[in-house]
DNA sequence: CTTGCCCTTGACGTCAATGTGAGGTTTTAC
DNA sequence: GTAAAACCTCACATTGACGTCAAGGGCAAG
């Protein structure tokens, strides 16, 4: 299959496929005239690559992980990478959940014309922003993200 | 409080705070000499803004949402925005979960020396990538993302 | 042979949230 | 008073996964 067909079936642009090749993620054959030829299995591979990109993995990391997909083997280094990326994703999901909760509170508030009946207003999440003060605040410990490669099961 | 103090307490750079102001997200007072002065409540506001940024909301969208945070009111348009962003986040969480599952399968496989005992190998998720074929594939319907503003409860 | 579509490489553009440095002013500490 | 630290504006640099245009070659149909 040529590049256009793969692009269509996998739902990506031909530009993206050439980019993947440039990054070493995909290595199509070439015809005598230089045109790329992909095996049927490339469609699934492209979908997997896209899934990783969507999850925020950089191409360099995906490049390190793809051999494990093929061989089913993971060197200690690759294993550490797998674990740390898994943790990154879990943390990102928690961040998303927190933001979604914030949106939910806003939706809740906006849905209730009378604040008395609004559950979200019983625990005031945000102080009103009034740029007309000049007092001080006690320092609040900003939560640091765990960057180690220990596997967090969740 | 001046910009450095806010930056420290909120855990962001002063550059970021100036950027937020440029985007209209934060409007500090100014001293006679031109230095920015923030109210105590700005720390919380910056944390909220950061939360939204982390969730992938662009500054333009945050700018539209912040008034709702302050007033507790949401115009129909703002409401639609709230709903669609909520859905975006939910979809992103699903994408992350899918990628995490893929990593989990890889971890599973790498953990089991004998494929017979590996649960992840019983449903072959990926075809082996072999760039040495030239066959055809039946088209596979790529799932389209729901872009409407209907509220998906999850 | 030519029309038309798909392919090639190359290189510059995009977008968004910052980083970074220059060059100058204000505040703070001694 | 003076020096260090923090602040100001302006403006260019970065990063990553592509988009987009340019200039040309390959290939089936009529």
Image: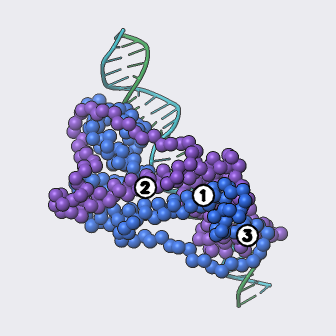
Chain colours: A blue, B purple, C green, D cyan
Rendered position, A25 above or below A142: above
Q: CA distance from mark 2 to mark 3?
A: 37 Å
- The residues bearing labels 1 and 3 have C-alpha atoms spaced at a distance of 25 Å
Q: Is residue C13 above or below residue A153?
A: above
The crowding category of the residue bearing disc 1, from other C-alpha atoms within 10 Å (few below 14, some 14 to 19, many at least 20), is many
- Location of residue A11 with respect to B57 vertically, above or below: above
What subunit carries mark 2?
B
Closer to the N terminus: mark 2 or mark 3?
A: 3
Q: Nearer the viewer, mark 1 or mark 3?
A: 1
Residue shown at 67% from the left, 59% from the top: A109
Disc 3 secondary structure class: loop
Which numbered tag is attached to residue A55? none
Q: Residues within 10 Å of mark 2 (few under 14, many from 20)?
A: many
**Quarter the N terminus of chain B occupies:** bottom right
Provide residue D27's location: percent of width, then percent of height: 30, 22
Q: Which residue is found at the position 63% from the left and 55% from the top?
A: A107
Q: Which residue is mark 2?
A: B96
Host chain of mark 3: B
Q: Contact, CB < 8 Å: mark 2 with mark 1?
A: no
Whether labels 1 and 3 share one chain? no
Q: Nearer the viewer, residue D13 or B95?
A: B95
Which residue position is annotated with label 1? A103
């Amino acid at each position: 299959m040529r590049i256009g067909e793969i692009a269509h079936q996998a739902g990506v642009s031909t530009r993206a496929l050439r980019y993947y090749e440039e990054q070493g993620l995909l290595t199509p054959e070439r015809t005598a005239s230089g045109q790329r030829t992909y095996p049927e299995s490339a469609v699934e591979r492209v979908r997997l690559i896209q899934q990783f990109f969507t999850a925020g993995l950089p191409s360099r990391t995906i490049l390190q992980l793809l051999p494990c997909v093929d061989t089913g083997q993971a060197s200690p280094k690759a294993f550490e990478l797998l674990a740390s990326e898994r943790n990154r994703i879990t943390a990102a999901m928690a961040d998303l959940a927190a933001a979604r909760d914030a949106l939910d509170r806003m939706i809740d508030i906006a849905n209730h014309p009378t604040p008395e009946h609004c559950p979200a207003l019983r625990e005031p999440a945000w102080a009103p922003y009034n740029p007309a003060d000049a007092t001080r605040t006690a320092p609040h410990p900003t939560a640091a993200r765990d960057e180690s490669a220990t596997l967090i099961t969740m």
